[in-house]
Image (cartoon, rainbow, N blue to C red):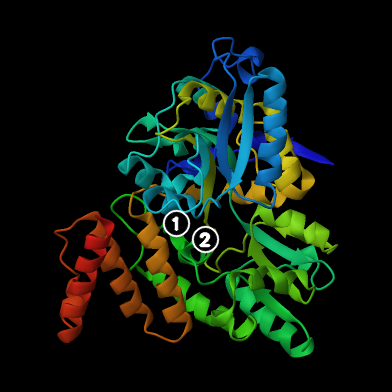
Amino acid sequence: MKSGKIATAAIIAASLLAGCAPQTQIESSASRQSGSSEKESGYEVNSSLTSDEITLMVWESVNGPDEWIKKAGEEFNKLYPNIHIQFHNVEIDDCLTYLTGDMGDNPVPDLFGAPSDALGKLVENNLVLPIENSSFVTMNTLYTAATAMNYNDIMYGYPTSCETYALFYNKKLISEDKLPKTWEALVEWGKAFNEVYTDCTAFVYRFNTMYYSSMLMTRDNNFIMQKENLGLTGESAKYGMELLVRLKEIMPENMDEFEDSQYDAVFLGGNIAMTVNGPWFVPSVQAAELDYGVAPLPGFEDGSNTYSFSGVRGMFIHAATKHPKEAEEFAKFLVSEDMQKLRMEITGAMPCVNIEVDADMEGFVEQLQYSYMMPSDSYMDKFWEMGTELCLNIYGGEDITEQLTLFNDAIMALKDPDYVPSTACEESGENSASVAEGAQQASAAGE
């Protein structure tokens, strides 16, 4: 069963956009420049490419993207018999580490997949080339997908998928009509559920990353890491971390000791009622033969919506490639409608072009209405790293206000080396020196 086109289904009412969500909100294809035609939306063979026999090395992740790159490469080779595509596994979360440091045994790529929030660091380190055909991306991909490929008003890559997360639920443990509408209701429902079903658990999610836990901080449209307002020390941020502590009561014990794979595994085992995850998790849930559903995230009891981070995966041309024109042509080919359909079928990822999506995607499409782009600032790697420490500390019982202030000061030091820690921390005497020292270390680490 098919749902409506992703862009149409994810349309946001003008009233929502007025003063609420950042400009990076997922929008409809109507937000693209006018003048797009069927000819522009398809793929046309480029007769100006080299006639020499060449091989393009492509870095991408396994568990879906690898199969997609290989099949796309086969189709590309039918159009260009002299150009061969070779896949090499480097996970997108690791590509920046390898490209900026020791390459290890990895071959130098011509193209590589990376998340949009890494773009600032890639540009800062001169690792990517600007693309030549930016108008194609602007005319043929969703507004947010195209925007995510821009850094300092220059386009550097081709988007390959859009993503955000939503609420998965096990229909054998909770029906759709019983889903809690708010986080506060989820806590109360979870307590009652865990008391009755002692061999099951109400809820689990990767609490130890700000990619997910930031959602709890978005009450009253409090968007994290947007421009000058980091959104990390206000009442909404504090309330979100208080919710994290409350959610601990209804989640598995000792989650701070979980390996990353365990968060997925416990839900796939069939004894967890709800979890938060992305469309990439759909193939695993289907393989586990769970009777599941996907719904938008719960809101807050004051009527506020929960906003999720949204991200875009891109295909970037490595600055050291000897075949920049051919590399860009393959990246462009990956954005064609057929290749986007193929990626969605293989990986379960949301497409970055306006095509029909499966009914399984509807919960994600709904949540996209309440999502905002992850920033691509060059210090985002430190944000994620220090965010994990923040979440673990608060989960472990540390003072919420103090931890948020420390986190905010460290990030502000990365943004501005002349930043002076907040007055609230300076009043704490010895702790003030510690905060200042930590901020200086964070700033030095980001250089």
**In the image, residue 324 lies at what x, y percent?**
46, 25
Q: Is residue 85 above or below residue 283?
A: above
Q: Which residue is drawn at the image coordinates 27% and 66% (left, top)?
A: 410
Q: Earlier in the sequence, mark 1 or mark 2?
A: 1
**Residue that extends furthest to the top in the rendered view of this protein:** 47
Of residues 373 and 443, which is closer to you in this image?
Answer: 443
In the shown orientation, is residue 438 left or right of residue 80? left
On residue 304, the disc is 2
| Three-letter residue code for mark 1 | Asn
**In the image, residue 289 lies at what x, y percent?**
85, 62
| Three-letter residue code for mark 2 | Ser
Q: Is residue 417 above or below residue 180?
A: above
Of residues 10 and 20, which is closer to you in this image?
Answer: 10
Quarter of the figure with residue 342: top right
In the shown orientation, is residue 385 left or right of residue 228? right
In the rendered image, which residue does mark 1 sit on?
221
**In the image, residue 209 lies at what x, y percent?**
49, 67
Q: Which residue is drawn at the image coordinates 81% and 57% (left, top)?
A: 286
Q: Is residue 232 above or below residue 96?
A: below
Of residues 128 and 257, which is closer to you in this image?
Answer: 128
Real-space Cα separation, disc 1 to disc 2, in angstroms: 7 Å
